[in-house]
Amino acid sequence: MEPRKFELRYIAFKFFRVDPAWRRLPKAERETGIGEFQAAVEAYRSRAAIVAYTTQGFRGDCDFMLWATSPELATLHDLHVDLFKTALGAYLETPYHYLAMTRDSTYTKDHGHSPEIHLGKGEGRYIFVYPFWKTREWYLMPFEARQEIMNEHIRVGQEFPSVRLNTCYSFGVDDQEFMLAFETNVPDDFQRLVMRLRETDGSRFTLRDTPIFTGMKLPLEEILRSLG
């Protein structure tokens, strides 16, 4: 068996929405809730990489996202349970939650791409996350035809070096097939990249690529205080 070329990781994109009742609580209660939530996250730093993004002002159905990755699937479960045990957790919902894994890409070996997920390395202030499905016709095509289409897709991506793509695989573990997370300091470059990709042959095989989430990376404490 060929040795694995990447570190296997389990990845969760956790989107949270705060109950408006949270904002009406006395300040002391909110401070307790914020402290407990932060402590719960910090307790997992040795077991998982966790990065926080605000979505306030960008979406109306969620307030912030935690991007968590760990070599152990159970860690993502334990983290989620402990977050909801906090005083703030009692006022949170998860309208969206996506699970995925790392996997060595079939199509990028000749392009010098690494399957490594660059989570927590400060690659960009902004992040754009969405689930992705391809049509069944895509998988029924010969590999050589798919590789040719992906070569064009990769070349277009290389036109925008300010945008880093993290491809996560959800086959068998969640509803979607992929989770895509683009990091950049230049949001306009990401939009131009998306527009260019719409013009490629590969776009014919996109079944669905929504909802799309825009997030801004901030310290967790700053995000939590902005909730109230």
Image: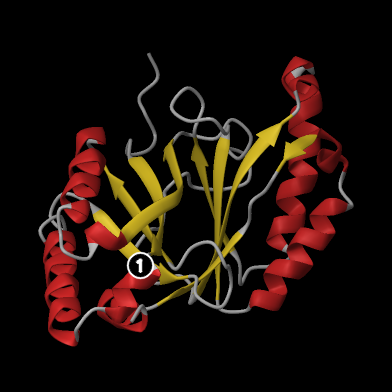
Q: Position of residue 163 (x, y in %)?
A: 61, 67
Q: Height in image: 203 above or below 91?
A: above
Residue at the (37%, 78%) spot, across then down: 218
In this orientation, which residue lies closer to the viewer: 171 or 193?
Answer: 171
Q: Position of residue 172 (x, y in %)?
A: 47, 22
Q: Height in image: 106 above or below 221?
A: above
Residue placed under numbered mark 1 in the picture: 52
Residue at the (50%, 75%) spot, across then down: 56
Quadrant including the C terminus: bottom left
Name, please, the residue furthest toward the bottom: 27
Q: Height in image: 186 above or below 171?
A: below
Residue at the (48%, 77%) spot, across then down: 125
* Amino acid type for the residue under numbered disc 1: Ala
Q: Position of residue 211 (x, y in %)?
A: 64, 51
Say whether residue 118 is left or right of residue 209.
left
* Quadrant position of residue 46: bottom left
Quadrant including the N terminus: top left
Q: Height in image: 104 above or below 210?
A: above
